[in-house]
Amino acid sequence: MTVALYIPLEEKSYAHAVSEAIKADIDSLGGFPTPHIAGLPVAEDTFGQEMFVQMGISAPMAGGLIFLLLLLFFRKLKVVLAPMIVAMMSVIWTMGLLVSMGFTLHIMSSMIAIFLMPIAVLDSVHILSEFHDRYQETRDQRKAITATMDDLYGPMLFTSLTTLVGFASLMMADIPPVKVFGGFVAFGVVVAWVLSMTFNPAYAVLISKKSLENFGVQGDEETLLAKWLPRLGAWTLRRRGPIVVVAAVLLGVAGVGISKIVVNDNPIRWFKYDHPLRVAERTLKKHLAGTYMTYLEFDATDTESGSVKNAETLKYMQKMQDHLDSIPNVGSTTGVTDIIKKVRFELHSQDSAKYAIPDSPEEIAQELFIYEISGGDPEDLYKLITPEGDKALMWIQLREGDNRAVSSVIGAADEFVVDNPAPAGMSFAWAGLSYINIVWQDKIVNGMLEALIGSFIIVALMMIFLLRSAWLGLISMIPLSVTIALVYGAVGFSGKQYDMPIAVLSSLTLGLSVDFAIHFLKRGQDIYKQLGSAQATLKELFGEPSRAIARNIVIIALGFTPLLTSSLVPYITVGSFFLAIMGLSGVGALIILPALVGLRGEKAFQTWGHKKRALASNTSIEQNTLQS
């Protein structure tokens, strides 16, 4: 035997506390089997509680693993402290500002720290990698860090600007939590850049020479990266044609996967399959009418009678209930109609013929009055109808609470109204967390998509302007495009539904994927100015610049694997996306970009003013020759 107790809440923020109090009461009474507590308010509030726990566990674990990976690459404790300090200061300043301004922590704002960590570490690893290679040339910290910052200032400025645009664009969304998330991550990006430009050089100069003893001596000349990256560069140039063709084919296949994406969400699914809330949902759906509630309001204010307490309106409501009850996902509907029919049924000695809405308005009023004075709480009636009788509420209990399932029920009700016109002046309004989640998903998916498209266009224009080359600007977007296409194509092929966490991660894809391309191409431009040969430039690029990119790929991709052990699905999704984004964007920067550059030949790294400068240089040489 299964008995259910339904507890309406005024605020979902009470849900977790109420569920814990119920468990405590049941434990004190004893003699009961394991209770099942479910419902969207409980799920969302419980997620908020567990989110803090996971944030306190997963984020430090990720930071710790990043620290160990940095130590593995650079092998100097004092040196690798610098990027960790920059990352922690960026997170602390951003989260401190968030809380001090009175913003609450929720699923999106809780991920600000996780998003900022890799962004803050990326620049620092590039600086540390370049400093690592340069120090032994002079054994002078000041000269080595100055040369490092001279080489990296431009690329790091570009990457910070593009990342800033990506997240700041979220402030244009209609949803306040998305605006807060985008705004504060953008602030954190600025903080991380300022600290990378100021703290890292100052820290490097203050490190004692003793602490830097042997720093870089056994460095990249003997490492796997130094051994294999030049070979990768040579192979990429030899196979540049097939590489470009394969990339194009993969984009086409990814497009098919993207077309298979199903937009859907359910906060219950944010927990793992064996979580007590998931178990409770399945159990109650099996034995009862389901755990998801949505509400339909009937507003008769503008009707001729101004009241729902008339036969025409009540019979229309009953007809609506009968229609909804026929839908498989609807477990039950409840309204004031059920009270009237039940009272009438009992007053007429349980005559089944009387279990219906009466035609007489006087009889309807009497049956409602009898129920009101029947000994229960008089307020119970007003959970379904207002005291003035101008509005009534229908409770619709659903077996499935996915947004698509809820939308289908709402669509069925809308179709019913079209096919069966309501009394003149009657209006309808939906309410409840199940309905709110539909509106939320629609806004966040559309908002994120618009932000992603807008940011993509802006970043592309920025790259064309910053690199002063339409060719370089456009190909700099190739790793980003490949990454986005393959990641979301995999989502479509895997059958994983496009939910809120995945929608939010689109901004992370933009922020991280373009980083490596910028470093590769901007450093390539700088090297080309010195060497004057595209082939020699590519060979140089597969030295320190590529080693820095490879280190970042490994550090960020592996550094956030602790998120995969989380009990919350959104955190697992974030960890998976870090792996995919870093891996794919790294492949794009180290394989696809060199292949495209190789196809372009000597014109690859040339900027808009290259021909004019070359002509001016030749003219100057001729004049000097004549003078001589």
Image (cartoon, helix red, strand yellow):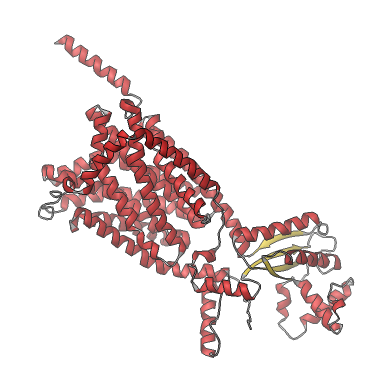
Q: How many marks?
A: 0
Horizontally, is 563 left or right of 65 in the view?
right
Residue 190 in the image, given as x and y percentages of width and height: 36, 48
Q: Is residue 374 visible?
A: yes
Q: Quadrant of residue 264?
A: bottom right
Name the quarter where the C terminus is drawn: top left
Residue farthest to the right, as pictured: 360
* Residue 354 or residue 16, whichever sits in front: 354
Q: Is residue 244 above or below residue 125?
A: above
Name the quarter where the N terminus is drawn: bottom right
Q: Is residue 196 visible?
A: no
Residue farthest to the top, as pictured: 626
Q: Quadrant of residue 284?
A: bottom right
Residue 561 in the image, given as x and y percentages of width and height: 35, 60
Residue 450 in the image, given as x and y percentages of width and height: 53, 45
Horizontally, is 84 left or right of 57 in the view?
left
Which residue is depicted at the point 28% across and 54% down?
A: 86
Horizontally, is 369 left or right of 568 in the view?
right
Q: Is residue 374 above or below residue 248?
A: below
* Residue 554 or residue 92, whichever sits in front: 554
Q: Quadrant of residue 531?
A: top left
Which residue is depicted at the point 25% across and 60% down?
A: 68
Residue 193 in the image, given as x and y percentages of width and height: 32, 48
Q: Is residue 510 above or below residue 76?
A: above
Q: Is residue 32 above or below residue 213?
A: below
* Residue 175 or residue 348, whichever sits in front: 348
